[in-house]
Image (cartoon, coloured by chain):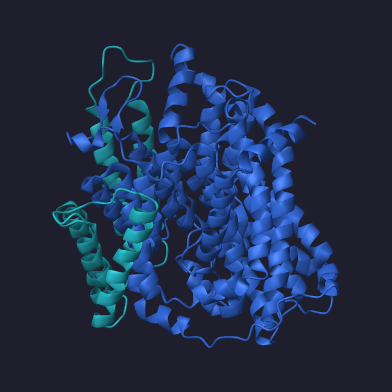
Chain colours: A cyan, B blue
Amino acid sequence: MSDRIFGGIGILIALIFAYQATIIQESFLSDAVGPKTFPLVIAAVMALASVYFLIKPDPEPSWPRAGRLAEIGLAALVMLAYAQLLPELGFLISTTLAASYLTWRLGTRPLQSAVVGLGTAIGIYVVFKLILGLSLASGPLGF
Amino acid sequence: MDTLSSLADGFSVALTFQNIGLALLGCFLGTIMGALPGLGPSNGVAILIPLAFTLGLGPTPALILLTSVYYGAMYGGRISSILLNIPGDEPAMMTCLDGYPMAQQGRAGEALALSGIASFVGAFFATWGLVLLAPQLVKVALLFGPAEYFALFTLAFATLGGISASNQAKSAFAAALGLGLAMIGVDTQTGVPRFTFGEVHLYDGIDFLVAIVGLFALSEVFIFLEHRGSAEEEAAKPKVVIGKIAPSWGLIRYCTPTMLRTTVLGFIAGVLPGAGASLGSFISYSLEKKLVDKKGTFGTGDPRGVAAPEAGNNAAAGGALVPMLALGVPGSGTTAVLLAVLLALNITPGPLLFTQNPDVVWGLIAALFIGNFMLLAMNIPMVGLFVRVLMVPPRILMPIVAMISFVGIYGISGSSFDLMVMVGFGIMGWALRKLDVPLVPVILGTLLGNEMEVNLRRAVTINDGDYSILVGSPLTLILWAIAIVGFVLPIFVGGIVRARMRKAAAKDETATAATEGANPD
């Protein structure tokens, strides 16, 4: 079933992609092939492959239980938040928070996670900023 | 002779203080990444690319660092295969078969040392193969016009799934997805924006480094989150006694014919499109078993069974560099990632690389020789150090990997938008892996998409809009024929090859379970 749904999504993406390709504004100075042809070929390949999934799906993969799915979703949200907060809070604070969260969710005890998270942030800061001179995001506090 | 003098020039490039230091660092990090289950060579290189950039390394030093990681990871994969019976990366799967039984008999140190030597033999001779074969291939490649290149790119996609590909439709889908992603941004030929949905950030296209790090490194973090409990049980396995490290000369001599034979086999498997290191080690092991295993000792801790796959996969790793450097078309996952390095450094791989940037090519090759000796030194006396690193649990390690990925990407662009795109790719990579869609074609598509389209348009434009040029020369016809055979063959024989690989590995379920989610070399 997963493969069928995947095939459906694939066809949808291929259709959107093909439609987006047809509305590309062509400039009057175009070459013989133009900017639309290759994307249309790609959309065709994608659609064909997706039709194959619909007709002949592979055996069902083992999806994680809902709890684990939520776990992965939450981790992704934390990472997105990290991307947003990085310039606001600075590297050390946001990295400590994100690394602690991930360490905790991967099965470390909460207090230990906080320590490991802080250690990770400081370790990366020392190696990459102080030793290698990389520019990491600096927040209002300067780190 | 020409080749030798180029090689000598290469050594003068590679033998600077900085480059040797980078090679040492790369070998060290690579061995660690190879040894850690879950972090294969492609992940290792992917995580380090952005860093090599933000550090402002030039093309040669950056390549030296990253190919050392590549070679190092090929050495490192065996450590956890032998000690824990969990392959550190997919090519090391076959090493479990005889390596772990040897460890159980208290001969872990011997197995580690012997496989280190086998790795060295494989990699060393494969690097010589690269030196000799690549310039020959360049001569052929110089005959290529745009139409031939278009056919060659198609060939690369068609064969990338490899002979053991499970579902060619999924490989095709992955390639189309990657190519489609490459189309995003301003069209290089006419200057019109494509698929940008009016979002200014997308006008430059999607940075393939963001895609690579997201797809490989972050999706690995998600996989670990998914399998949290089980991963810990594996890590809690009892520690085996390493025993004496030095193997006797007799043992080495006993295994030498095996190493030499499998080196040749592995190298060929590496050069051929769509084979790669995993197949290299598999073929090596099975043929060697047929050839010398008269008493049925393979699988019960036969030293030759440790030497064969290790020489094979390291030779294949060297062989895979041949098409990548000479044609600009990678044949395996990790070489695809290495191609990204070249492209990001504004170096076009392929035949012109050898004439325009000989210092890069030969410096790199010389660095591989140097790296090999370093790896031999690191992997025999210092193997205990790596064993200790293996004891760091993934629950602490994976967040570090994630954070270093973020640091690297943020260091390049300083944009939160790129980081969010990367997280998106991480989720996508996780979902695609669950659905058994290979990630390497996606990467290759984003890398080569624009180049492929440019060649198509150039070929047709030169020919006044006539598409028949695409099949207009004998060379194109040959390339198309290989592409079609390479795509169709696995549909018929893929099942057989896969079944054999599985049977060989079935002796130990943990081995297969651990590699299931892993990337192909």
**Is A113 situated above or below B53?**
below
In the rendered image, the quadrant that contains the N terminus of chain B is: top right
Residue B293, position in %: x, y? 81, 73
Viewer-side residue, B133 vs B33: B33
Viewer-side residue, B347 vs B62: B62
Viewer-side residue, B322 vs B392: B392
The residue depicted at 25 percent of the width and 27 percent of the height is B193
Q: Count how many numbered circles sit on residues in the image.
A: 0
Residue B72, position in %: x, y? 58, 58
Viewer-side residue, A40 vs A80: A80
Residue A10, position in %: x, y? 31, 49
**Is B277 situated above or below B513?**
above
Indicate the quadrant where residue A139 lies.
Answer: bottom left
Relative side of B109 to B334, left or right: right
The residue depicted at 68 percent of the width and 69 percent of the height is B380
The residue depicted at 28 percent of the width and 55 percent of the height is B423
Relative side of B283 to B394, left or right: right
